[in-house]
Structures are given as structure tokens and as C-alpha cells.
Amino acid sequence: MAGMLQGKTALITGGARGIGRATALLFAQEGARVAVADMSAEGAAETVGMINAAGGQAMSIAVDVTKPDQVAAMVASTVAAFGRLDCAYNNAGIAGYQVGAAGQKTADWSEEAFDRMLSVNLKGVWLCMRSELEQMVKQGGGAIVNTGSIAGLVGLRTSSAYVASKHGVIGLTKTAALEYAENGIRVNAVCPGYIETDMTKDTMARRGTELMAMVPLRRMGTANEIAEMVCWFCSDRSSYVSGAAYNVDGGYMAT
């Protein structure tokens, strides 16, 4: 039986580790040719090596999603290698601890930290979408998925700039879905809850017991559980789904 993404070409940012890597591996397993992009060239190459070792087809691209020229080159390289761009997963992002703002309330964030958070998590997604949409309009369709978060749906203490960035991502997602439906392009967002990745280690070390008490399933999610949703979004099985922000959170948003 053919995979859900058989014959499709996909681009994944933030593919060097965590959710991005898990998604790249699943996409390849489901039949897609995958361009794995990340600021860490070494990490992206490791993901590609895993895909190729399993019999898939992939390429790695070093990219800083805050740099317009690099983002445009990333999409162009993907199309040059694989001929088209059917699926794009804009997953690259950072957390508060990566800008020195772990545990800080809104008024305690530095301007530098706030700007860096929005530059990567929001503007970076927009820059990727801009180039991806231009290509998909030319070829007559495609599917884009952005990594939102439960932080894009509600407020979270000590995460103000992260929350702001993820609310922005969901706004971009919904707007683009409206604007490009006539071009055969679907745009959706996946909104993870607390997932077992490097990015959540700091938060879980500080507040893990408290946070798990707020999750009805009483556990963290896995990167593979997010990858499954992204794969579905990019497949023809979700052909009537666009402009959605699906939370994958163990029931957190239901409380």
C-alpha cells in the first residue's frame, strides 16, 4: 500500500532534532522526498542520513529562517532538486530559555529577547510562507503546516513573547488559508502541548509536576505524535481542512 505522501515533495524547517526530525522521518516513511532544513547543518545532515539509511530520499539545507535570502534559496534548492514543492512544514522555532528569558514575567523580558523571539518564531514563519506560497501558486497547489502551540491559543505565565509569537503564527495561518484557497493551497497549524523534546526540558525541570497535573492524559506527548498530525495535514486525506489550528495536547485545552 502506498504511503500517505507517496510521490510528494516536502520541505521541513527545524528538521535537525525533536518534532522536525520525527516529522521528516515519518514523511519519508510515508513516501515523500524530503528537504530537511535547519540552522544546524550537522543536525540536518544527520536526519538526512537516517532517512537515506532507511531507503528514503532526502537532502539537507542549512538555513537561518530570519534571513530572507537564505529562506528564498532554501525553497529554490528544494524545487531544483525535486521539481516542485507539495508540502511545507514551518517548524523552526525557539523557546524562552534560548533568549535568556526562562521564567520571566512580561515586564522582565528584555527588548533584545522579545525581538529575537518574534524574529524567529513569527517573522521566520512568514518569510518561509512567502517563498513557499509563491512556488505553490506557480505550480497550482500545495499544503503548508505551521507549528503553533497551545501558547497560540491561551496565555501561559512567564512566556509572554513566546505566546505572542505563537498567536501571530495562528493568525498568519488563518489569513493565508483564506487568501490562497482559490490557488488550491491549504494552510493549517498544529498546536502541540507539552512534548518530550529538548525545548521543554527547562520548563519541565522548573514546573513539570504542576503542568502535568493540568494535562488530562497525565503525560507529555511525543514528537512522533505531532508528526502524525502534520503528515495528515499534508496528505490528501485532509483535503477539506484549511485554516485550522489543531491542538495535540493530551486534553490540556479541554480543561
Image: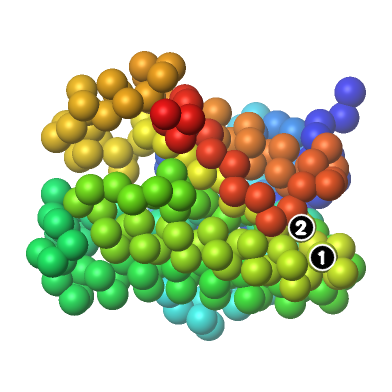
Lateral position of residue 75 relative to residue 138, left or right: left
Do the residues bearing badges 1 and 2 touch, measured as CB atoms within 8 Å? yes
Q: Residue furthest front?
A: 255
When the figure is inspected, residue 204 is found, relative to residue 115, above or below; the finding is above
- Residue at horizontal 68%, vertical 69%? 176
Task: For label 1, count other residues whose C-alpha is less than 10 Å away and answer few (under 14), some (14-19) or many (20+).
Answer: some
In the image, what residue type sits under mark 1?
Ala
- Residue at horizontal 77%, vertical 47%? 241
Q: Nearer the viewer, residue 12 or 124?
A: 124
Checking the image for residue 64, the label placed there is none
Residue placed under numbered mark 2 in the picture: 186
Residue placed under numbered mark 1 in the picture: 181
Percent coordinates x, y for residue 44 in the rendering: 48, 51
Percent coordinates x, y for residue 167 in the rendering: 45, 60
Task: For label 2, count other residues whose C-alpha is less than 10 Å away and answer few (under 14), some (14-19) or many (20+).
Answer: many
Lateral position of residue 103 relative to residue 121, left or right: left
Q: Nearer the viewer, residue 80 or 201?
A: 201
Q: Quadrant of residue 220?
A: top left
In the image, what residue type sits under mark 2?
Arg
* Element type where label 2 sits in the image: strand
Q: Quadrant of residue 118?
A: bottom left
Res 255 seen here: yes
Looking at the image, is mark 1 or mark 2 earlier in the sequence? 1
